[in-house]
Image (cartoon, rainbow, N blue to C red):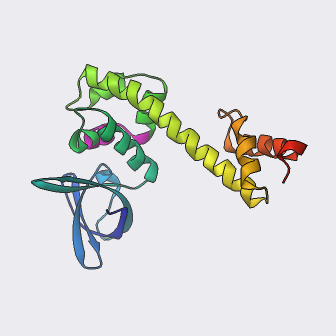
Amino acid sequence: MIAYLKGEIVEIEGNEIILNVNDIGFAINTAHIKTLQVGKTYTFYIYEHIKEDEYSLYGFLDKNELRLFKLIVEHIQGVGPKTGMNIFRTLSFEEIKKAIEEKDYRPFLEVKGLGEKTAKRIVLEIGGELFREEEEDKVKEVYQALINLGFEKDSVKNALKSLDKNLTVEELIKEGLKKMSNEKYKA
């Protein structure tokens, strides 16, 4: 499994680049063609698509883009990597995320190969997954921050259970510290 590739772009053709990584050229499909330059070094987070007769790499400059791409192509029936990449070529990461957050399927109708039914499924099905993952990431960050401050793991876990997950990371840490200062959570 390839997590990421870092190298110099030696060629750009269509929607694909050739990335030189230690004298091996990797063909990578990407939505970022307009912002890339031959001769520059980039890091691409990779989605591998492996089928009987096909092996393709899809590259993203940001881990969050890759995560959202994976959610779409792995959870929405009928949306494969090619259509998924068309979504990212048509809409920016922020536009995709905003449409999902606002449950607005209309921006997805601009994407070649997506119909109204599939656009609605993306908004409905990915919305819950996206927010669940973001919440988990936030809780992990707060958990690690409190552990780094010297609190015991079990105490931190107990304190985190009662926190409002809609707060920002900073607010969660403050609330966690308040809870940890209570006798029942002390180490």
Q: Is residue 13 left or right of residue 103?
A: left
| x and y percentages locating residue 153 in the rendered image | 72, 54
Q: Which residues are magenta?
A: 85-93
Quarter placement of the C terminus: bottom right
Please say if 133 is above or below 107: below
Who is closer to the viewer here, 29 or 117?
Answer: 117
Q: Is residue 49 magenta?
A: no
Label the magenta part by its dominant secondary structure. Answer: helix
Q: Quadrant of residue 74?
A: top left
> Does residue 120 show up?
yes
Please identify the residue farthest to the left as the structure is shown. Answer: 53
Judge whether residue 92 is colored magenta. Answer: yes
Q: Residue furthest bottom?
A: 23
Q: Which residue is nearer to you in this view: 13 or 165?
A: 165
Relative side of 151 to 75, left or right? right
Quadrant in which the N terminus is drawn? bottom left
The image quadrant that residue 57 belongs to is bottom left
Could you say where residue 151 lies in the image, as x and y percent from the top left? 79, 56
* Residue 72, position as x, y percentages in the image: 34, 37
The answer to whether residue 182 is visible is: no
Q: Residue at x 35, y 44 (%)?
A: 70
Asked if residue 102 is positioned above or below residue 14 in the image, the reply reads above
- The residue sitting at 40% across, 24% down in the picture is 124
Closer to us: 30 or 178 = 178
- Total number of numbered discs in the rendering: 0
Residue drawn 54% across and 41% down? 134
Q: On screen, 30 above or below 165?
A: below
Where is 129 relative to 20, above or below?
above
